[in-house]
Image (cartoon, rainbow, N blue to C red):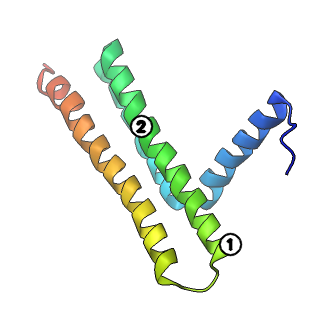
Amino acid sequence: MSKNHSPTASFGYAIRGLKTAVKKEPNFRIHIIIALATLITASILGFTTVEWLLLAFTITLVLLLELVNTTLESIVNLVSPKISEEARIAKDVSAAAVFLAALLAVIVGLVLFIPKILSLP
């Protein structure tokens, strides 16, 4: 593949990748829906700049790892179409990374949201 792509073309490929993830990956859609609900709730609760940054980094981490997991699964399927122990390990470990990021996101969410909710009149 040639690496002589214009910046416009590169952005186009990235957008196409996001569209593909949204269209073909149910877990990515779930993460997007949860992220949107979280962002709306944070807006209603009046998050501070630091809270927004923590939330943005946490949400982005989960989405990035979901994209990397999808990429790895696609590569494994391409190079190892037959079921193998190595392919299973690669997929399971990649899924574990997403799971840990999602677990972290829940913890960060609890730390950020509980004090705000408890301080409501």
Q: Amino acid at mark 1?
A: Leu
Q: Quadrant of residue 83?
A: bottom right
| Whether residue 37 can be seen here | yes
> On the picture, is 21 further left or further right than 53?
right
Q: Residue at x 57, y 61 (%)?
A: 72
Q: Nearer the viewer, residue 16 or 73?
A: 73
On residue 2, which mark appears? Answer: none
Residue under circle 1? 78
| Whether residue 32 can be seen here | no
> On the picture, is 104 further left or further right than 34?
left
Closest to the camera, between mark 2 and mark 1, is 1
Q: Nearer the viewer, residue 93 or 31?
A: 93
Residue under circle 2? 59
Q: Which quadrant does the C terminus fall into?
A: top left
Against 102, residue 74 (above or below) is below
Residue 91 in percent (x, y) is at 48, 68
Residue 116 in percent (x, y) is at 19, 23
Local crowd size for mark 2, using a 10 Å CA cut-off: few (<14), some (14–19), many (≥20): many
Q: Amino acid at mark 2?
A: Ile
Q: Nearer the viewer, residue 14 or 86?
A: 86
Q: Residue at x 55, y 50 (%)?
A: 67
Q: Residue at x 48, y 44 (%)?
A: 63
Query: Mark 2 or mark 1: which comes first in sequence?
Result: 2
* Secondary structure category for the residue under label 1: helix
Residue 62 in percent (x, y) is at 42, 44
> On the picture, is 17 further left or further right than 25?
right
Residue 74 in percent (x, y) is at 63, 65
Against 28, residue 91 (above or below) is below
Q: Are marks 2 and 1 in contact (CB under 8 Å)?
A: no
* Secondary structure category for the residue under label 2: helix
Q: Residue at x 47, y 49 (%)?
A: 65
